[in-house]
Every structure is written in C-alpha cells, then in structure tokens.
Amino acid sequence: MNHIQFESFGPQNNWICGGYHDSNSTKTISVVSPYFDQEIASVPDSNIDDLEQAVNAAKKAFPGWSRLNIRDRAEIMYQFKTILEKNMDELAHLIALDNGKTIEDAKGSIIRGKEVVEFSTSLPSVLRGDSSQVANGITCTMTHEPLGVVAGITPFNFPAMVPLWMIPLAITTGNCFILKPSEQTPLSALKMAEYLKESGLPDGVFQVLNGSQKIVEGICDHPDIKAVAFVGSSTIAKIVYSRSTKVGKRALCLGGAKNHMIIVPDADLESTAKGVLASSMGSAGQRCMAASVAVGVANVNPIIEQLVEEAKNFILGVDMGTIISRPSLDRITSYINDAEKMGAKVLIDGRVSPPPKGYENGYWLGATILDGVDPEWPCAKEEIFGPVLSIIRTDTLENAMKIENNNPYGNAAAVFTTSGEVAKTISQASKSGMVGINIGVPVPREPYSFGGWNESKYGHGDITGKSGVEFWTNLKKVTARWPESEEAWKKYF
Ligand code: NAD
C-alpha cells in the first residue's frame, strides 16, 4: 500500500477574506485520522459571529467580483486548475489522512472534481448570452447574473470533490462563496482556499467556515445568503431544504442513496464481476454512487462465483481505505451481524480481513458479500455506507425492476447485460437520476450534470454541468428600443 505518513496539524482556523481568521468561538471539534485513530487537527466549532464575519467579507467582495468580466474570472479558474494539478500529491495526502481513502482513490476524486473546474473555464463561451430582434426596432438580450453571497455545505466522503462541484461554478458566475465543510474532513477545504488565493482570487470571494449544526442552521436562516447547496445524508438534506426555502432561499440539497445493480445471466462474466465489485467496494462503499444491492435475475451463479473470487483478492489499504469513524464501523458491522442472524449467507466476510501492517488501530472493514438477502431486510433497504454488497435473487426482470423502483431513493441504478433490449427497458423504467449500462458507478462526466431523483435530492435541477450554472444564477432579460432615424438609414445603407 501507499505509505500514509501520520501528521499532526494542530488547531486550524476559518478562512475569511483571503486569510486564516481566529474564530469567536471557544469550542473546537477534533479531527481524527481513521488510519491511526488519533487526532490530527482541531477546527473551530464556529458561532453566529463567525458566520456574520464571513457573510460581511463576501458582501464586501461581491460588487467588485461580480463586475469583473467573466473571462478574467474564468482565467483564475484556469490558474486554479494548474495549481490543483501541481499539488495533487499534497491534496491527496490530506484527503487520505482525514478521510481514510487510499492515495489512488483520493487522486481519482480530485481529478473528478477538477473536471468541474475545467468546465468553469469554458463559461465565457457557455454564458455568452442570447440576443435577438424580437420586434421591429426592439432587441431582447438575456444574460446569467450572479445571486450575491451563496453557500455550500458538504459531507465527509469526498472532502475535495464535492466542494469542487460547487465552488468553480458559483464563483465563476460572479458569486461570493461560503463553504461549510464536513467537520470530520475539513483539511482539504482549507488547503483549496490557499490554492484559490494563489490563483489570484480576490479576498472575500471564498470563505471556509468550520463548524457543525449551528452554522448550517445559521446559513439556512441568513437573509444575506441567497442560495445554499447541500450534499449529505437525506435526513439532513431534507431539513436544510425546508429550513432554507421557508425563508425564500434557493436550495438544492443532494441526499443519500440505495443503488441497485440488476444482473442478467447474459452479462459478460469478467467485466460484470469487476464492475459490481468496484461499485460496491470502491471508497470502502462510502459514496452515494456505490451500488450496495445486486439483484440477480434467474441463474447468475457463474457471475456471483467470479465476483467472490475477485473479492477474495481485495487487500485493505490497497484496494480500499478505511471507514470514516469508529461509530460508523460499528454501525456497518451491525448490519452484517443482523443480516447473518436473519439467514443471509456470508460469501465473503470483511469482519475478519486483516488490517494493513502499521495501521492496526485504523477503522478497517474488508469487502463483505451477503447472499440470499430478502428485499425487506434492513441491509437491503437502508443506506449502509460501507463495503457491504447484498445479493437478492429473483426470477424475472420485472420483479428485479420492482425491487429497484420500490426503494425511496433515486440516485443511481445499473444493469449488466449484453442485450440491448434489456438495457433499454431498464434504463427507461428506472426511477433513478443516473443509470449505468454495464457501468456500476454511472457518474456523468462534465458537462453532463450530476444529480439523483426522489429522496436522493430535494430541490430542482442538478449540481454540476449547465444545470449547476442555472442554480447559481438569475436570468436577466433586457428588452430595448432605440429611436430609429430615417435619415441615418438613408445616409448609411
Ligand atoms: P451528513 O448529512 O451527516 O453531513 C453533511 C453535512 O451536514 C456536514 O457538513 C455536517 O456538518 C452537516 N450536518 C450534520 N448533521 C447536521 C444537522 N443535524 N443539522 C445541520 N447540519 C448537519 O452526511 P455525511 O455523513 O457527512 O455524508 C454521508 C452522506 O452523504 C451519505 O448519506 C451519502 O449518500 C451522502 N452523499 C450524497 C451525495 C450525492 O451526490 N447525493 C454525495 C456524497 C455524499
């Protein structure tokens, strides 16, 4: 495995108006590395005075930033992209340390986030505006205008990528941004603030406010914050959405997931086994795009056997990192224990996987595969958010679709088949926002937008791509009539 060096960063601050800023709060939150079960930093549990300072800094920066032409704003994003690339090792190390990802996984997540930065550099072309003559002598022009001060609240599982879904589009369109990162994984957000400053971003355009529930509630309620994007569990997504929209704020809140993969007997053996495993176990199952239920239609035993063979070769610390915390590890393990008691067959048992040498104190759980799972059991219905795959057996494609569509979430679904007809039927019938055909993690690449349906999202639109641009802007329509002079026509034409 890649060597993860223990490092202690001590007390961290907020980032306000282009620099580190002491908090007004005396309360702190401990940041623990899941590789070592040891504190690596602490961040302020910020209070409402801190929020006020962040909002004031953003408000002060807004007139100048929003007036700057979009080419110059996009140029800063171009510099930011280069700095992200140059510092990939540094950022990946921070993500590995506070989140528990492998270095390779952490780098993959930065690369995915960087795609949104790249897309934001194309905004001068994408947002060039529409204009046409709508009546004799009358022209209508439509432009995307920034909202003002806006905010993003992000989860632990992608400490750099999820903020990167929001920051580039929000600020390139002319807004000033306040990020409230997960208190479990705040280190890369602060590092990205330094990179943005180095890229030439004016002070006050970007703030990082550390904290927990109080700050989230303050963001929802604040009259000067015009929009809030949230990514996290469905329970909190729903709370943030209703609290923000109640005061007239624009909100887009992405929640949790329970994604299914339908496997039919004609599926390609090797690539299906690899795809199913990568989807369920990648990032130790801690991603909203992880498919944690495989629905096998009729006899898919050869594929399951191949899957088990592949899973046996999974090495902790190489193929997957740690679980985020001890309570999460205990919660995930209890899903496995309960399913076993209910009669599931444990084909691969991650509870007994050996931890990597030198990291024995970490929160490890190996790849786990449960067979013969009933669709009504908790492991089949609830978001486990760990490296646990539940296999449900069924006879028909129709039943498989029912199982998939009965779940209240709607983030992603996948089908593994060599039949075009089956693939088409599933993708049309699925009630998920993102569908994979022979792809277990169907994350749309930019500029196609990211976002689920149903209980996986509260609010309209998606978080990235053109849809993200629409979220962070208002449309302005200017209709103009200029006096026309007959004389000028005669003279010049
Ligand atoms: P979480 O909901 O616990 O936390 C997300 C954010 O909400 C954090 O910044 C946290 O500080 C804040 N928060 C937590 N409790 C709060 C409360 N009571 N009131 C106000 N704010 C609160 O999520 P998490 O555990 O950090 O992340 C995992 C979850 O995120 C999973 O459910 C996963 O599916 C989801 N997720 C979804 C997507 C997506 O695109 N749909 C992407 C990544 C993660």
Image (cartoon, rainbow, N blue to C red):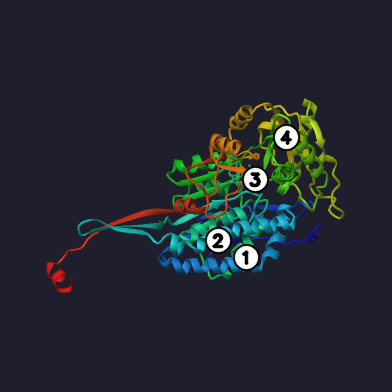
In this rendering, the answer to whether 417 lies above or below 48 is above
How far from the left and from the top, in percent, is residue 436?
Answer: 61, 43
Which residue matches tag 3? 439
> Residue at coordinates 13% horizontally, 70% vertically from top-left?
490
Front residue of 433/29: it is: 433
Chain-order first, disc 1 or disc 2: 1
Which residue matches tag 1? 84
How far from the left and from the top, in percent, is residue 255?
Answer: 58, 42
Q: Name the kind of residue labelled 3 in the image.
A: Ile
Q: Could you say whether the residue bearing mark 4 is in a helix, strand or loop?
A: strand
Question: Mark 4 packing: few (<14 Cα in 10 Å), some, or many (20+)?
Answer: many
How far from the left and from the top, in percent, is residue 149?
Answer: 46, 56
Q: Are marks 1 and 2 in contact (CB under 8 Å)?
A: yes
Q: Could you say whether the residue bearing mark 1 is in a helix, strand or loop?
A: helix
Q: Could you say whether the residue bearing mark 2 is in a helix, strand or loop?
A: helix
Q: Name the kind of residue labelled 2 in the image.
A: Val
Chain-order first, disc 1 or disc 3: 1
Which residue matches tag 2? 117
